[in-house]
Amino acid sequence: MFQASKPQTNTASAIRLLGLIYHATVRNLRKTHGNAVIGLLMNMMQTVVFVLAFFMMFNFMGWRGSALRGDFLLYIMSGIFLFMVHTKAMGAVVQSEGPASAMMKHAPMNTVIAIASAALGSLYIQILSMVIILGVYHLAFTPIVIDKPVGAMGMLLLSWFSGVAIGMVFLSIKPWFPGFTQIASSVYSRANMIASGKMFVANQMPSYMLAFFTWNPLFHTIDQCRGFVFINYNPHFSNITYPFWLSIGLLFIGLLGEHFTRKNASISWQARR
């Protein structure tokens, strides 16, 4: 505690930072539930409930025929998994430790570590849940065939990255407008139930409806992901570059806002969370 700080090389500083992010990520994962297995099962059950709810809704409303040719449950899961990764990443970043948090009183800790650990923790738990659900479905029900698994995984990571970028924007304004941020992030998450386009196929949508969805980066990643998952689907009305560059821009805006907020941090903000 009272040791004199020693100058470190860039490599040593990077290794130390990665170590701190790792330990902070483990702490974030343990915060959700005292038992790691139960925490994972709770997240898996939330995803399974989403999948079953959309499966029954498609069957009840007669929309199953409008889906892609191929495994119908895989079509639903390709949308649900990306939606969950995106939404959970945004929520984790928004709820991460701020500059006025008690954790920031510890010398090695800073907001970069808190944000990175929250984002990586959400990605870890979502990927683990996805792998287990797909594994059980593959072994117990029917074999899964993914045309281009590397591309599909890339779209999952891009959905996570866009969620982190949007969460950064909300996090940067959270200390200034805590009530608005909570409402706005909640509205965005609820709106993505429809605006993400996970219930629709972009190629089959009329042009006047596409304008309601193309603004959303998650709409593009889900549609592109289905192009990688299914061999007989080629997305024409979505692309990869839009969500990538939009996420880069939002991330820089969020980082600039977070930097300004951190420089003007007040201890009283913690009571307003």
Image: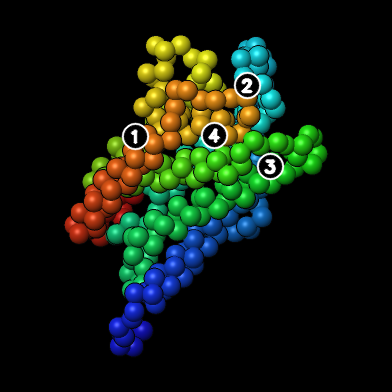
Q: Residues within 10 Å of mark 1 (few under 14, many from 20)?
A: few
Is 141 displayed left or right of 214 in the figure? right
Viewer-side label of 2, 3:
2
Say what secondary structure mark 1 lies in. Answer: helix
Q: Residues within 10 Å of mark 2 (few under 14, many from 20)?
A: some
**Residue position for label 1:** 184
Instruction: From the viewer's side, name the closer residue of 35 and 87.
Output: 87
Q: Residues within 10 Å of mark 4 (few under 14, many from 20)?
A: many
**Residue position for label 2:** 68
Say what secondary structure mark 4 lies in. Answer: helix
Say what secondary structure mark 3 lies in. Answer: helix
In space, the residues marked 4 and 3 are separated at their CA atoms by 18 Å
Q: Residues within 10 Å of mark 3 (few under 14, many from 20)?
A: some
Say what secondary structure mark 2 lies in. Answer: loop
> Which residue type does callout 3 highlight?
Ile
> Which residue type does callout 2 highlight?
Leu
Residue 240: numbered disc: none
Residue shown at 57% from the left, 51% from the top: 125
**Mark toward the start of the polypeptide (3 vs 1):** 3
Viewer-side label of 3, 1:
3
> Which residue type does callout 4 highlight?
Cys
Q: Position of residue 57 (x, y in %)?
A: 63, 19
Residue shown at 41% from the left, 74% from the top: 16
- Quadrant hosting residue 118: bottom left
**Residue position for label 4:** 225
Instruction: From the viewer's side, name the closer residue of 56 and 162.
Output: 162
In space, the residues marked 3 and 1 are separated at their CA atoms by 31 Å
- Quadrant hosting residue 177: top left
Residue shown at 58% from the left, 44% from the top: 150
> Which residue type does callout 1 highlight?
Ala
**Mark toward the start of the polypeptide (2 vs 1):** 2
Disc 2 and disc 1 in contact, CB within 8 angstroms: no
